[in-house]
Image: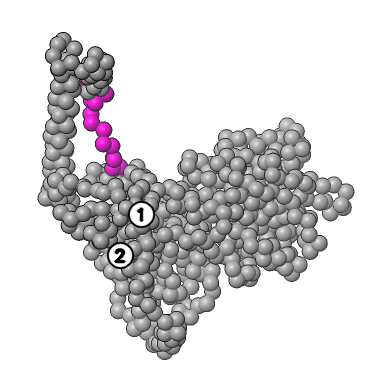
Amino acid sequence: MLTSVLEVVVIAFMIKTQNIMDSKVKFTSYNSTGLGPSRTEFIQLLLNCSLTFLLVQESWHIDNNTDHIRGLHEDYHCYPISGMDSSKEILYGRPYGGLLIYYHKSVSGRVSHVNTHNRRFSCVSVKLGVHKMFIFNVYLPNDNYSQVMCTEEFKKCVDSVEAFVSENVSDNDKIIIGGDCNVDPSRNNAHFRYWDDMLTRLGLKACWSHSAAVNDNTYVANNNLSESCIDHFYCSSSLFNGITKNNVLFHALNKSNHRPINLEINLDLNSETQGEGKVFSKRTAWHKATSNHLDSYKELLGEHLDNITVEPGCLCRDIMCKVIHHHQDINSYADMIVQCMLDASENLPKTSKSKRIPYWNQEVMPLRQKALFWHQLWVDNGKPRMGLVADIMRKSRRLYHLKVKELQRSKEQNKFSRMAEAISKSNDRDLWKEVKKLSNSGAQADCIDGITGNQAIADHFASRYKDVYNSVGYSNDNLEDLKAELNELIKDSDSERDQYVTVQEVDKAVAKLNLNKHDGNLGLFSNHFKHAPKQLHVHLSMLFTAMLTHGCTPHELKIATLTSIPKDLKQSLSDSNNYRGISLCSILCKVYDLVI
């Protein structure tokens, strides 16, 4: 596709995670009971308190009227979920429900909107290295005050939360639930016990029970005669010990019956990312996938893609659009497409990183222990050169080394046999590439420029690459002039076709991808695209069109994984000057480049 004005996309090599926030992550939950002028003013006041996340319940908004909500504060993005079905022509009764999750723009690159398909609870996920933190905003049905029976609506809502967590949250992910739960622990009634049992099964703790918490009532009845504590935060055990504050906020400008509750957790997102180090995760072994595997992947991916809800920002075609939250809609849309492909390939064969030699414990370990025993006995006897002890020591050591060599040879033979069998069954694998992999020594150095340790060496290379990629300077004034010139060209452009990407153009781009290429970061392979159903190409055409229309690039397309490889194996492997960097870019970005 040729365009009169092409967006210049700079792929940002994210060498090192930026310090986007301090170690304390600040949450506030607030049931506003509407979004009138006084409520809106108070929400703006809360957002001015340098919060990371603000969870709002009972916003009483409808799906097609969210611009004023999203634009409430220039430093925050918003993920709104209406409590009402706006598809109906007439809505009877007073407005109810509605959930808003505000999050600071400094963390927007880590945040993804998660569709719960439920109007009682919403969710966003935050990337923490190789894991995630899921933040839930809940508004549960009213308490019936019964000691023996829960309402069906309440049970259905609680069961939906548990089912969603079980299906979407892994064991190593973290969870925070906040909002108007409409249960008071002091009542210890049927509703509270049903909710508490669910929290126990999920391994979540009430933040009010922490020693740093200052508990108080969060709700005042209209007649001011009764108060209760029905607004809560809950979190995973791994987050509980990091709580530094949990309190109720009393403020004269608050016109709602509910008082906001604050939660601060000592969680350094930067260290969460860098502290993980290099974690091996099993990738999809596409060469092992059978035709049944591929058919299953295509069918499952089609189902996942059909469940994606396309946000309004992704459908906007105003090339001069200035609505900021449309960029976040596009970012979340890209995340959902990628996640659908990863989820659909979960049941495909995986690679293995095991270096263990088969039968080592059964055949080698006894001989090794015997050799060590006689060696120690030989040492204790003064290391005699001759005699029974010396002869047995030498014989036991010889048998041990012979068995090790025998199993190593057997392992190599099995490797060649498996490789030959795989090549005979698949046309995707190149024989000579496999032979080259087997013959490659994989030489590595434990010390680079006097620096040791994996993390320290990675940081050292990161610093060198940062200097290289920022060695060419630029003028901010020139950049602003270029942007202004591009905007004028866009205004004067007569072609309405330039910003649109068709499904046929995506078809051609995907066809040009080589098989078995991966991105090094998310675990996506080119095979994920090559074996995908037609629905993926439709979604990609909509995503790329939205990107060109708004001049924005989703976060995942900006990431590349840099790997340092030796220039010359005969030279010193401890000298950083003997290394060059190669980058593994996003497969989604490659498709986009091919389309452009």
Residue appearing at x 26%, y 33% in the figure: 356
Residue 425: image location, x then y, percent: 15, 43
Q: Quadrant of residue 152?
A: top right
Other residues around mark 1 within 10 Å, as few (<14) / some (14–19) / many (≥20):
many
Residue appearing at x 37%, y 62% in the figure: 463
Image check: 186 left or right of 80? right
The image shows residue 22, relative to residue 409, as above or below, that is below
The image shows residue 370, relative to residue 26, as above or below, that is above
Q: Residue furthest top?
A: 388
Residue span colored magenta: 348-363
Front position in the image: 373 or 470: 373
Task: Give me the disc on residue 458.
Answer: 1
Real-space Cα distance between discs 2 and 1? 26 Å
Other residues around mark 2 within 10 Å, as few (<14) / some (14–19) / many (≥20):
some
Instruction: Work out whether mark 2 precedes mark 1 in sequence or the reverse, and give the earlier one.
Output: 1
Task: Give me the disc on residue 590.
Answer: 2
Circle 1 sits in a helix, a strand or a loop, which is it? helix
Residue 208: image location, x then y, percent: 69, 43
Image check: 199 left or right of 214? left
Residue appearing at x 74%, y 51% in the figure: 248
Residue 157: image location, x then y, percent: 62, 44
Q: Can residue 338 be spotted in the picture?
A: yes
